[in-house]
């Protein structure tokens, strides 16, 4: 009989600003882990000092630059029965941070994966934005190159859900200007900076207004929340656009049949019309 792995991978949320927001279980997991994989070991040390916790286990770095190489090593530890704790600089691992590759590899080997829920810049910004949050999507960081960024924004311009983006402070003004061009200057948005920290600020308004404000410079950790596109009238969309809406949902993991049904329901169209648009697009491609 094949031996089942006894190790466990624990994904732990860390404060996005205020140390007091650390989950109560975090200290216990840090003390219990055989291996702690940290995005930045120096930041981990500052966090453990603030929490008054000592780590008896092995501490290794696990960041974008060594993620591919270190994942097999951590999987071997897990298969050997180790309790591996994964922490990133702030927020939950795997959410625009290292973690996905390790989770994927652990799951493939039948290793148990669990989590210590903690702070999230995505959810915090959504809650503070003042925009609809019943349905939302996370877009992460936009491409750095202007052309690629504009293309990505055109791709999500018709997205009806509230969108959340991360952005570097030195690119915020350009990104907001590009959003205003792609989505329209009147589309509502919120720029959330330094969440839970001393200089926390949430700036709300139309994209054009926020883009003008950001020209003077914006500092700190930035999360941008943008209102989704208003419902389109059936007559506004042609077959190619209908097919693109379905493709976007498929890219997000939906089955085609379900995606077609959702698009049809949202636009008040017969499912057959949307289906025919998808078939026509496939023939073109």
Image (spheres, rainbow, N blue to C red):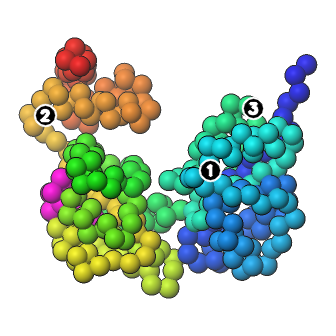
Residue 129 falls left or right of residue 95 = left
Above or below, comparing residue 16 to residue 200 in the picture: above
Residue annotated with mark 1 = 66
First in sequence, mark 3 or 1: give its number: 1
Of badges 3 and 2, the one in the foreground is 3
Quadrant of the snapshot with the N terminus: top right
User: Depth check: 244 or 174 in front?
Assistant: 174
Find residue 158 and report its image quarter: top left
Residue annotated with mark 3 = 110
Q: Residues within 10 Å of mark 3 (few under 14, many from 20)?
A: some
Residue 282 falls left or right of residue 106 = left
Q: Position of residue 155 (x, y in %)?
A: 25, 42
Residue 219 falls left or right of residue 152 = right
Residue annotated with mark 2 = 237
Question: Is residue 268 visible from the viewing direction of this image?
Answer: no
**Image: magenta residue range:** 180-189
Above or below, comparing residue 107 to residue 59 in the picture: above
Residue at the image position 60 percent from the left and 55 percent from the top: 63
Of badges 1 and 2, the one in the foreground is 1
Q: Position of residue 48 (x, y in %)?
A: 74, 74
Q: Describe the element under mark 1 as helix, strand or loop.
A: loop
Marks 1/2: CA distance? 45 Å
Question: Is residue 41 visible from the viewing direction of this image?
Answer: yes
Quadrant of the snapshot with the C terminus: top left
Find residue 262 and report its image quarter: top left
Residue 196 falls left or right of residue 268 = right
């Amino acid at each position: 009989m094949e031996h089942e792995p006894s190790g466990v991978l624990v994904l732990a949320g860390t404060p996005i600003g205020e140390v007091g927001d650390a989950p109560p279980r975090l200290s216990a997991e840090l003390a219990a882990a055989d291996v702690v994989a940290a995005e930045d070991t120096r930041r981990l040390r500052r966090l453990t000092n603030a929490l008054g916790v000592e780590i008896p286990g092995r501490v290794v770095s696990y960041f974008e630059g060594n993620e591919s190489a270190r994942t097999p090593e951590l999987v071997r530890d897990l298969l050997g029965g180790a309790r591996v704790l994964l922490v990133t600089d702030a927020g939950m691992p795997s959410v625009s941070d290292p973690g996905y590759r390790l989770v994927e590899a652990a799951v493939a080997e039948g290793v148990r994966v669990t989590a210590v829920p903690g702070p999230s810049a995505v959810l915090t910004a959504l809650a503070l934005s003042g925009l609809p949050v019943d349905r939302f999507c996370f877009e992460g960081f936009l491409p750095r190159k202007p052309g690629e960024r504009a293309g990505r924004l055109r791709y999500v311009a018709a997205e009806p859900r509230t969108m959340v983006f991360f952005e570097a402070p030195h690119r915020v003004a350009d990104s907001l200007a590009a959003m205003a061009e792609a989505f329209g200057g009147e589309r509502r948005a919120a720029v959330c900076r330094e969440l839970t920290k001393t200089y926390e600020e949430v700036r709300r308004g139309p994209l054009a207004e926020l883009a003008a404000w950001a020209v003077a410079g914006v500092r700190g950790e930035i999360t941008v929340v943008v209102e989704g596109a208003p419902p389109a009238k059936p007559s506004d969309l042609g077959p190619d656009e209908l097919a693109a809406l379905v493709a976007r949902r498929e890219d997000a993991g939906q089955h085609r049949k379900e995606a077609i049904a959702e698009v049809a329901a949202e636009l008040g169209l017969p499912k057959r019309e949307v289906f025919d648009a998808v078939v026509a697009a496939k023939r073109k491609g």
